[in-house]
Structure formats: structure tokens, C-alpha cells
Image: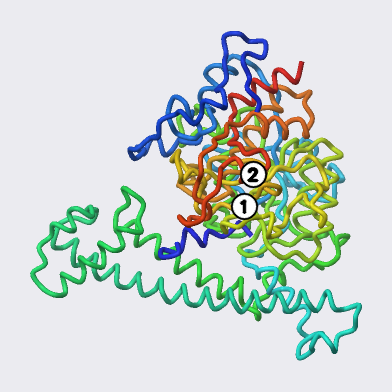
Amino acid sequence: MMFSLNKSLTVFGSCLILASCGVPAIVSTPIENIDTIPLKNIDLTEAQLKTWNLLDLVSDTIPGMSVNKAYNELIKTKKGQTVIVGVIDSGVDIEHEDLKAVIWTNPGEIKGNGKDDDNNGYVDDIHGWNFLGDSEDENLEFVRIIKKLKPKYSGKTLASVAETDREEYQNYIEAKAEFEKEYQEAAGNKMQYEQILQQSKVSHEAVAKAIGKEDYSNQELLQLEAKTPEMQQHIAFLSQMFGFMDPGDTVPEFITNINEGVEYFTEQLSYNLNLEFNGRSVVGDNVDDLTDLAYGNNNPMGPDPKKEGIKHGTHVAGVIAAERNNGKGMNGVAQNVKIIALRAVPNGDEYDKDISLAIRYAVDNGAKVINTSFGKYYSTHPEWVEEAIRYAASKDVLIVNAAGNEGLDLDQKAVYPNDQTNTGSEIANNFITVGALNYTYGDNLVADFSNYGKSNVDVFAPGVKMWSTTPNNSYDFMQGTSFAAPAVAGVAALIRSYYPKLKAPQVKQILMDSGLSTKARVIIGGEPTNSGIFSELSKSGKMVNLYNALIMASKISK
């Protein structure tokens, strides 16, 4: 699934030193100087928030990727090659005002003739493929495991199971334990959020009426005279809620967020954790048969005319390549990009079959970069995805992958997809996993939700409050490693655009080696008592930096 943001939803738990590289006038940021940069102690403006991933750590004291600096100083007058980027996600609004100009069109297909003109097995696949057909909601993988194995193992003990079945039985037992934990947590959170929502609405209505406006501050709230015990309770409650809000947020925005939390946990209980629900039934394929290919359709926006289910994928696409300097919305990281839209990630856990086939589709249709902003902690056919990753490697395609949002050490907890074998070695050298940065440079540099890992996370990139495209010509802030990955995919696409001789493993290494690092200790998982040295939280120990990456690419490409 698109990695959940439980840590953000739950209110209460809530290099190389490059000197010139042949271009004497251009000097990259020396890594050892980063820790001398003063911290920014003031809140970012809305304009800064909307572009912070494009800003520069030195000049702006914001840990962006120096994108604007790179365009202004390095590639302003250069012509690059077009790079195709595959976006495997919930779907993409290919009609969006800021995306329609960068959507890939299949040159071998004739639109609307009902034929497979290019003989690739997909009929009228003009802009990509929808592997989910008309399905939208799905179980989590461990729920599917329980449903599949319950008839075989219900009531059994380890001693009563054949030795050849014991590994499968243990998987079933672990899935049951995970289900019970997650179900109770979701049910409890839903109840808590509903209570908070109800009280917030009542208290806000009373306070807004007394103050005379909806968007009052905490200071204005505390200055309100409480003439009755009820008003005193309303003020106390809302003041407590302000403590869980981001700076600058209003109570109406808080109520909207809480309502989204109620909806999130309701969907979990109704679909993701519902043992009686089968979202795949409308698709009609055999999910355990990789050769059963006659399914899905050519609409990467999915079945919902309101496009509500494709917000995640549309946002990801915008971070990578929303049309630059067109006077609309926002600028994506990369120019010279065409996006293949591949709908393969439902509201729930993705199927390994869909992901494997989507990777292969992107590769076979010319993608040089693939973004995979999803993941799960159980997998029934991981070998299919591993084979697809190897296939992409054989065709010189870089896969940029989100690390996940549970604040976990991925060296201790496996997540899928990944490029690690059981022994810890990499299955391919074309797969880069990205953790998320916060926009504040200091001990909160790592996003409180971001997974990390010295071996299994490669780099970090901006992932908190990312402004990007959302369906129906709208724009919004979203956050997660899901949006750190496309930031890096955009950087990778630019490297491949201006330095096309570089191979995928070289691009990966440039992304890792050219980044900025810090020796500072940072909070991990949003727990102040849990901290670590930033440089030890990923394999590279660095933050992706486009400016430095292009300089290094220039040097290596010669």
C-alpha cells in the first residue's frame, strides 16, 4: 500500500568534496562545512513551504536539494534528452493542468481502435496501464494470508503440522498475531478520533462564536474570558489540541485532519482489515498465476470519475515532473520527462503480481527511472518482484523506492519491495531506497515517521509537507517517504537527461556519494528519547543534492 502515516495521523502518539570538476566557476558545497550552517529558528513562510524541497541548505538554511540553484547555475541553457519515468502507484490524473504535457504517449499504439497495435499484450495502452481494473480497496497482505491458510491450519498446533508445512504454518500464526494487534489498534484509534472530532466541533463552535471568527490563534483563545464552566472546558480542550497542531494551523484545519483520521481508520476496518472483504473479485484474474495476463484496462486514472483514489499517485507524479515554469501550480524537480502512469497500488496492500508486471511494463516501454512509493511488511510472492528488479537492472533502469513511514529500523524489519537477500547482500545494483527529511535543519532533520537503516536505506530526501499536484487541477501538501522517493526520482531523471552515457548503477552511486551529510545527532521515529547520528541512519549517510550530483555526473561522464 502507499505507506501508512500512522505516526502523523495519531495525534497523541503521534562524498565526495567536489571543487570544480572541470568548471572552475562552480563550486559545490563542501560536506565538512555543513555543520557550521546556522539553524533557521523562524517558521517557514507559505511560499517557502511550497518550494522547500527545491531550496539550498547553504543559502536558505533549509535542507532542500539545491534544485533552483542547479537550474540557475548549471543547466539553465543546456539541452537534455527526454527521459521516461514509470510511476507505479494508485493512478495518475493524466488530465491535470500541470501534468498533461509531461504524460507519456505510447508511439506504437493507435488510440481507441481496440487493438494491441504494438503487440505488447495490452490493448490501447496509450498512457500506461491499470493493473487494478475497477478495484479500489484491498486487504492488507497478512489478512490475505490468513484467509488463504485458515482452512488448512485453523485449530492446528505446530506439533500437529507436517514438518514440510511448518514454515507456512508459522507465517500463518504471525499473520494472525499481526491482524489481532492491528485490528484492535485501528478500532481503538477510530473511537478516539471520533470522540476528539465530536468534542472539537462542539468546542470550536462555541469559541468561534464568542471570539467572532473561525481562524483564531491559541493566544486569542487563551485571552478569551471564560464566563461559564462550559466555556472554560472548551478553552482548555482546544488549548490542548493546539499543542498537537503544526505552527500556523487553525482549528478548522485540525478538525479536517481529525475527520480524515476517522475516515482512514474506518477504511482500515471496512476494507484493509476485513476478513470478509475481497476487493480483487472484480478484477477476475488469478493473483497466484504470473502468466495470467488478461486483466486490467488502459485507464490509469481508475474507475472513480471523482478521481479521489488517485491523489497519492498524482502527487508523486507532480513532485517528479510537474511542468516547470508554465505559470501554474508548482514546478516538478525534473524537466525533459515523460511519465508512464501505472495503476497497481490499491487502498490496501499491492499484489506482487501487479508490481512485477508494472515494473516490466515500464522497462519494456523505455523507462530509465521507475518510482515505487509503496510497500508492505508481508509478501507472498517476493521472488516475482525480485525477478522484475533484476530484469530492470539488465535493461539499465534505476528503481527509486520509498523506505516507509513507521519509524522503523529496516535493518531489523524487512519491507517489500527491497533489494536485499536473506543474507543481506543486494540482489541488484539498480535499486535505491529513500528516507524522508523534515524541512527544519537540526535535531528534527529526519521526519518523525521515516524508516531508516544503515544497510537498507540508501539516502534521505525531502518528504515532509510536500506541495504537489492532486486530482482535478488541484494542489495540496502531503508527506511521507512516498514523496521523498519521487524527489530523488526527479534528480535521477535529470542526471540521465543531461548525462545519458551514465548507467543506472552509476546514477545510484552519484545520488549517494554527492549528497550532503551532517555529524549531528537527530531524533529517530519522533521519539525524543531515541536519537542517532544522521550519517549512521543510511548507507550513504547523506541528503540527496541535485547541484552536487550534476557536478559529479559531469566529471564521471567524461
Name the kind of residue labelled 1 in the image. Met
* Residue 64 spot, x, y in % from top left: 50, 34
Residue 389 to residue 327: above or below: below
Residue at far top of view:
24
Q: Earlier in the sequence, mark 2 or mark 1?
A: 1
Q: Residue at x 54, y 37 (%)?
A: 519
Residue 51, by quadrant, is top left
Residue 237 to residue 57: above or below: below
Name the kind of residue labelled 2 in the image. Ser
Q: Residue at x 23, y 52 (%)?
A: 217
* Mark linked to residue 109: none
Q: Is residue 512 left or right of residue 326?
A: right
Label 1 neighbour load within 10 Å: few <14, some 14-19, many 20+:
many
Residue 181 to residue 336: above or below: below
Quadrant of image for the N terminus = bottom right
Element at badge 2? loop
* Residue 204 spot, x, y in % from top left: 24, 64
Q: Disc 2 to disc 1, how far (Cα)?
A: 35 Å
Residue 124 shows in this picture: yes
Quadrant of image for the C terminus = top right
Callout count: 2
Residue identified by numbered label 1: 301
Element at badge 1? loop
* Mark linked to residue 538: 2
User: Which one is nearer the viewer's eye here, 200 or 304?
Assistant: 200
